[in-house]
Amino acid sequence: MSTGDEVLLREAEKIALAVGRMLPGLCEVVLHDLRDPANSVRAIENNLSGRSVGEGATELGLARIHDPDFPGVLQNYPNRFPDGRRAKSTSIGIKNADGVYVAALCLNLDVSLLTGVAAGIDRLVRTEEQELPLAETLRARTADGLRSAVDDFAARRGRTARELGTADRRELVRELRAQGWLQVKHAVRTLAGILGVSRATLYNHLRDETPRTPGAGEGEREDGRTS
């Protein structure tokens, strides 16, 4: 056996040991010596498959031995442990200076341990589709945010804020109220400046968009809220 091949195997054995011990109980790491397929398992760290040192090569190992053009890395393919547990495997072939496969480093991740966790996380982050009485955002309302909301509304119509006509302004007021922007302090005064109209004009729009109950005595305050 080549001294160079043996050096490769010893170095690969260090990697198998380190990776296996980094992922205890979760990932099995097996180093195969492909020079001796009948006794190929040279090292096994974090044993999850029940194999022992000295056992024979797997089908992939035998394929590498017989085909120097076999893929060097097979990444994240589905597999199963002997007891039926699902696994995700990666097989890395190691060639010597002559281009001959002399070893394979195989990682077998026990994904069955993670299935329940993944299902629990999925339930935790799942939301329910439903119609809300208004749109909610989890950010503080500011005058700058109001300006951005107006600019976005106008851009969707291919206009600037000051080019919006009466119908668009009424729709804008309706949308801003539904989104809670008229709760911003001095919202009407700020909005009037953005649109280039008088506050009286905006109050008219607000009254147009506010259902009235005769005799209720409800009035509009400057911030657009009712009192």
Image (cartoon, rainbow, N blue to C red):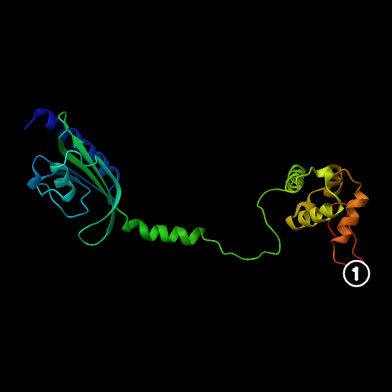
Q: Which residue is mark 1?
A: 216
Number of on-image labels:
1
Q: Quadrant of residue 209?
A: bottom right
Above or below: residue 10 compared with residue 78: above
| Residue 41 figure quarter | top left
For label 1, the SS is loop
Judge left or right: residue 164 versus residue 90.
right
> Horizontal placement of 120 versus 64: left or right?
right
Q: Position of residue 96 (x, y in %)?
A: 16, 31
Camera-nearest residue between 10 and 74: 74
Indicate the position of residue 124 as horizontal and vertical percent values.
Answer: 49, 60
Relative image position of residue 118 (x, y in whole percent): 41, 57
Instruction: Identify which residue is drawn at 92% across, 47% down.
Output: 198
Q: Residue at x 21, y 42 (%)?
A: 70
Left or right: where 180 falls relative to 189: left
Q: Is residue 33 visible?
A: no
Residue 108 position (above or below residue 94): below
Location of the C terminus by quadrant is bottom right
Q: Residue furthest bottom?
A: 214
| Type of amino acid at the residue the image marks with label 1 | Ala
Q: Nearer the viewer, residue 151 or 192?
A: 151
Q: Position of residue 115 (x, y in %)?
A: 36, 59
Within 10 Å of the Cα at label 1, are there few (<14), some (14-19), or many (20+) other Cα atoms?
few
**Residue 172 horizontal side relative to residue 137, left or right:** right
Q: Quadrant of the N terminus?
A: top left
Question: Residue 161, relative to residue 116: is it above or below?
Answer: above
Q: Mark yes or no: residue 124 visible.
A: yes
Q: Identify the residue at image location x=81%, y=54%.
A: 173
